[in-house]
Image (cartoon, grey):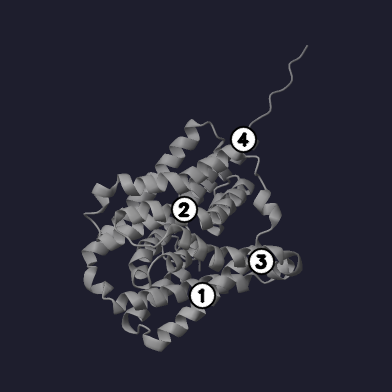
Amino acid sequence: MARPKLLPDNFTLALVGTVILASFLPCRGSAAIAFNWVTNIAIGLLFFLHGAKLSREAIVAGATHWRLHLVVLLSTFALFPLLGLVLKPVLTPLVTPALYTGILFLCTLPSTVQSSIAFTSMAKGNVPAAVCSASASSLLGIFITPALVGVVVSNHGATTGSPWHTVGNITLQLLVPFIAGQLLRPAIGAWIDRHRAILKFVDQGSILLVVYVAFSEAVNEGIWHSISLSTLAGLVAVNILLLAAALFITAFTAKRLGFSRADQITIIFCGSKKSLASGIPMAKVIFASHAVGAVVLPLMLFHQIQLMVCAVLAQRWGARKTAAEPAREGKPVAAPARR
């Protein structure tokens, strides 16, 4: 039986279970040190496999469609941070200062890759452009996100250390493994393509590890004593507001700039998403360990909300496109005029 489209997927349920586990059985002392080491290794392996999986053809595919990619990148790395800052008077009464820091961090993150491409395909959008745009966003985010965090988040009460130090850590822990995977792709790329389940296991497993370690530290610091149910409800409302604003602005902008319907769909889905797979490892590198739990909580909620909303939109737009095609094909062809 197919899962109802508005219910959480298995990975989201696993995330919730991991948070519950960390809330009742947090790791401490030597166990926390061991988990940190395992988590760092898993993150390095994750980005290594992503580098080996991503073909160079996919990286350069559609690169000539620069207007579309520019709109997506501006939405991801300019529109979202501006929304986080401009909406501060609306957002801050709903959440704690620590959660607002997480919201600003969420706004600096790159777009997703897998779901952006999947939803674009479902909605009959420009899939090659989505592959190129989402991949470029993910790769550029390794450099842009730390710089944005240093500007946007540090000016609003968060201590994240030197931006150069952060970029150095990101480069060492994320970019170096990614480049190593790219360099070894000719040797192991075909094997990776045949065993994508391994990448999915490492992808999801590394995120669950980071979430467990982050929330263990947050629980040890008393996170659940500072976040009430009303605050969580406010955080959900904030995420819905951010996503709705991003969807509306990207749709309006893409239409006004004269993009085709397929390109509009690509811009909407690639420009309104934020990557959980990139965001959680980056949060672990950028923020102090005791702050990571509160920082990633907005991202975890946004992840599920964006999946549910975009799934509904993609299915509706895809069905509309499919229904329109037979109608066009069924139109009678006018007979040639007689001389």
Spatial CA span between label 3 and label 4: 46 Å
Question: Where does residue 159 sit, x and y in percent of width and height?
Answer: 34, 62
Which dot, 1 or 4, sits closer to the camera? 1
Question: Which image quarter holds the C terminus?
Answer: top right
Upstream in sequence: badge 2 or badge 4: 2
Q: Which residue is mark 2?
A: 273
Task: Give the residue type at disc 4.
Answer: Arg
How packed is label 4: few (under 14 Cα within 10 Å), some, or many (20 or more)?
few
Q: Which residue is mark 4?
A: 328
Numbered marks: total: 4
Q: Residue furthest top?
A: 339
- Along the viewing direction, whichever of 198 and 184 lies nearer the viewer: 184
In this view, 124 is above or below 158:
above
Upstream in sequence: badge 1 or badge 3: 1
Spatial CA span between label 1 and label 3: 17 Å
Which element is circle 2 on?
A: loop
C-beta proximity under 8 Å, tags 2 and 4: no
Question: Where does residue 207 sit, x and y in percent of width and height?
Answer: 48, 71
Which element is circle 1 on?
A: helix
Upstream in sequence: badge 2 or badge 1: 1
Q: Is residue 339 left or right of residue 132?
A: right
Spatial CA span between label 1 and label 4: 54 Å
Q: Which circle marks residue 295 in the picture?
A: none
User: Based on the displayed image, in which of its 4 quarters is residue 101 positioned?
Assistant: bottom left
Question: Where does residue 84 sit, x and y in percent of width and height?
Answer: 34, 49
Q: Is residue 176 left or right of residue 160?
A: right
